[in-house]
Amino acid sequence: MPGAAPGAVPGAPPGRVREPIGAQVRAPRRAIWENRGMPATPTALAPAPAAPTPAQSGVGSLGSGALRIGPLSLDVPVVLAPMAGITNTAFRRLCREYGAGLYVSEMITSRALVERTPESMRLIRHHESETPRSIQLYGVDPATMREAVTMLVAEDRADHIDMNFGCPVPKVTRKGGGAALPWKLDLFRAIVENAVRAAGDVPVTVKMRKGIDADHLTYLEAGRIAEGAGVASVALHARTASEFYSGHADWDAIGTLKQTVTSVPVLGNGDIWSAEDALRMVEQTGCDGVVVGRGCLGKPWLFGDLAAAFRGEAREHGAQPSLGEVARAFRRHVELLVDFFDDENRACRDIRKHVAWYFKGYPIGGETRAALAMASSLAEFDELLGGLDHDAPYPGAEAEGPRGRAGTPKVPALPENWLDSRELREDHRLTLVDAELSTSGG
Ligand SMILES: Cc1cc2nc3c(=O)[nH]c(=O)nc-3n(C[C@H](O)[C@H](O)[C@H](O)COP(=O)(O)O)c2cc1C
């Protein structure tokens, strides 16, 4: 199970006075990677050139399977979901090497950014190959959000800013943050309006869940408010916070949102494990694009499949990499992590959470699996990867399907009396101050 990036959301430094929220209104035996200069995408996995288009319609669609988010034109309507602890510049670069679309950063808290904490400053960096540059912010205070967006824009650090309103983690929702926040319509509106105003020409988008639980849905009102505030698109992870990652995403809700929000693109998110799933979601819901999270864990080539599918290329099945190709992608990921952390040991520790995902279904043996999850240098990885049977073929169904977080439904943790009113009360403003301090994603 992946851990979220704990370092991604540092708290306020000691001594800082906290203001009430919203008060302002507002390769080894076989050297498989000796080819450092070669395109990292194994040819067999690389997307073929563009071809005609699948049925794709709706606001924001440019035809040819493309998507417009404000001034940005994406040649395929595919977004890498922000994932704390995962979608750092290393993983984004790797996914981009296979595919097309938009690749969103890990979530960064607006407060940490405004305070210019070293970790948040590191997380907002992009590699020069990353364009458009996309950053996801999380915040509970309109003024801090405005400051964070102003900073990103003034310093030319992003071409797209997404805002996260979907975190289901109890320690966040208990303070009124994450997926609990859109329940307070005035606060949600103020945050979104402030961000859009501060962003100027940089498109701002919203990512949310269906609501707190089945009896307290927020997504349709939030979608309308965000649309009215001038966002460039809205994305829905079609689960409630109480569902966490359990069961199945409710794609019908994506269809309902699409019918409700009519002037900007609606993106669907939840349980896309293959390119076929993505096309099916578009077909069933009418959504303008897809956001893909856990499905690409250990499978960056999924973005090649998605690009091919949305370009209408005839590919009956997705990439079916041999073990050698998987080993090469894994090695490339470690290499990019070394670049990102500028620290080989840290990179080798960070890749450990990805081992089970990359080698899911491949016959590498328990011992090698365990050794890969403990290796701490590139040389060790090279030794282990070089010892694998690179000709072992794609294992089929065993390598497919769900991966990553699942979890069980939970009673949502909320501030006392949170559900009593759709407007933010004074006592809840104070509770919210802590809601930004310990987030771990969506
Ligand atoms: C490890 C992990 C970290 C996540 N971090 C974030 C985050 O930082 N921001 C966010 O909006 N969603 C986050 N999410 C939620 C995903 O973006 C996505 O909405 C969710 O996984 C559902 O999509 P999927 O079924 O394609 O995985 C995270 C999910 C996972 C599994």
Image (cartoon, rainbow, N blue to C red):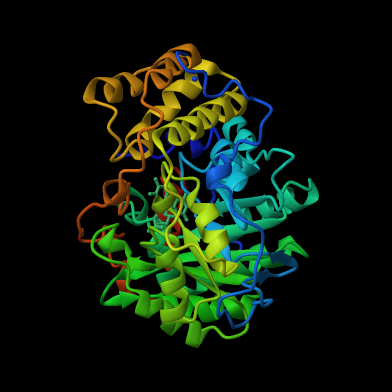
Above or below residue 255? Residue 412 is above
In the image, 146 versus 217, the foreground residue is: 217
Q: Residue 362 versus residue 62: which sits nearer the camera?
A: 362
Q: Is residue 146 above or below residue 382?
A: below
Q: Position of residue 61 (x, y in %)?
A: 64, 77
Residue at the (65%, 68%) spot, across then down: 51
Query: Horizontally, is 388 left or right of 330 in the view?
Result: left
Quarter assignment of residue 114: top right
In screen coordinates, is 159 left or right of 83?
right
Residue 90 in the image: above or below residue 344 = below
Question: At 52% across and 18% down in the image, what residue appears?
Answer: 31
Where, quadrant-wise, is the N terminus in this rendering?
top left
Is residue 427 in view?
no
Percent of width and height locating residue 284 = 41, 80
Q: Is residue 12 visible?
A: yes
Taking depth in this image into account, of 205 and 81 the one nearest to the observer is 81
